[in-house]
Image (spheres, coloured by chain):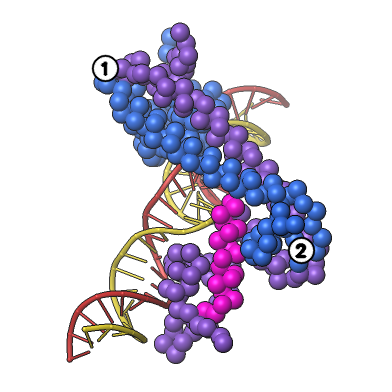
Chain colours: A purple, B blue, C yellow, D red
Amino acid sequence: MIEEYTIGVLSKESGVNLETIRYYEKVNLLPKPPRSASGYRRYDDNAIKRLRFIRRGRELGFGIDEIKTLLELADHPDQTCSAADKLAQMHLTEVEAKIKDLIAMREVLTQIVACQSHTAEHCRLIETLDQRTCCNHD
Amino acid sequence: MIEEYTIGVLSKESGVNLETIRYYEKVNLLPKPPRSASGYRRYDDNAIKRLRFIRRGRELGFGIDEIKTLLELADHPDQTCSAADKLAQMHLTEVEAKIKDLIAMREVLTQIVACQSHTAEHCRLIETLDQRTCCNHD
DNA sequence: ACTTGACTCTGTAGTAACTACAGACTTTAT
DNA sequence: ATAAAGTCTGTAGTTACTACAGAGTCAAGT
């Protein structure tokens, strides 16, 4: 049995925003589906699978172009996987760099928030940005 | 002594890209500086201070609009600081949320990278995105 | 004086990944 | 028959820049 879905149903099934689905089509992440007589997009189960694949990729922080590559790899199960391995490794490195940056931010912000501020003159945040003093200056 | 700088010097002194400085002016983060007879921007020490303030704010992850608010607060040292406190607290919450998301990504990616993959059919990354199995499935 | 190179000017367009309409048409339910 | 909900295309807005193009300006060397 071949089920067909409108874009609204596909959106709910895949967890991807309806407008985003059309956007994915425009950037060639999703193939153009067949249309009904009146021009409505008609999707099948394959589209759901593909869209879920994309959503999981996005949740892992992969970019559109990376996901395109991964989809192509997924379509060729006989190819070696070193390209995907490489992508995963590179992406992990980027994620780790972002975590490092954010943790540095968190450290400063935590110190700022931990202090009681009074007027803007002695405000911890503004002091920090002015680089007049730091929070733990006493 | 009032020192004057061209935009190129200001860029080096503040650590902010030259084009970014013009952009900051356009979005009203930096006041329009006076011009030389030939139309060149002329900055003073105050501009350096302000731009460094902005750079530190950006390094802490604050958005342009938030920094605008902080600059106004910094210009009014007699006001209470609760607005800045609130901004810092809100921003810290956002940073913590981002860290949480990225750590979740890192966890999955680390598992994927830790495994030896062979062909795309049994590729950990593609398996994960297909949600066929997870890395630690055996 | 002239030329060369570095600097600066304005304005526009591109980046990533969507999101939000406007205005028109179609389908479904009452 | 009508109204509500769904869908269509195409464009513009979001964030914080970055990258030009094409023109004018300044400083130093010859």
Lower position in the chain sequence, tag 1 or tag 2: 1
Query: For mark 1, does the 10 Å Cα neighbourhood hold few (<14), some (14 to 19), or many (20 or more) residues?
Result: few
Q: Given the image, what chain letter belongs to the residue carrying mark 2? A: B
Q: What main secondary structure does the magenta stretch of the protein show?
A: helix
Q: Which residues are drawn in magenta? A: A43-61
The circle drawn on residue B78 is 1
Type of the residue with mark 1: Asp
Type of the residue with mark 2: His
SS assignment at label 1: loop
Give how far across and how far down residue A32 sits, in percent: 55, 77
The circle drawn on residue B90 is none
In this orientation, does residue A84 appear? no
Give how far across and how far down residue B77 sits, in percent: 30, 18
Task: Provide the residue designation for mark 2.
Answer: B122
Q: Given the image, what chain letter belongs to the residue carrying mark 1? A: B
SS assignment at label 2: helix
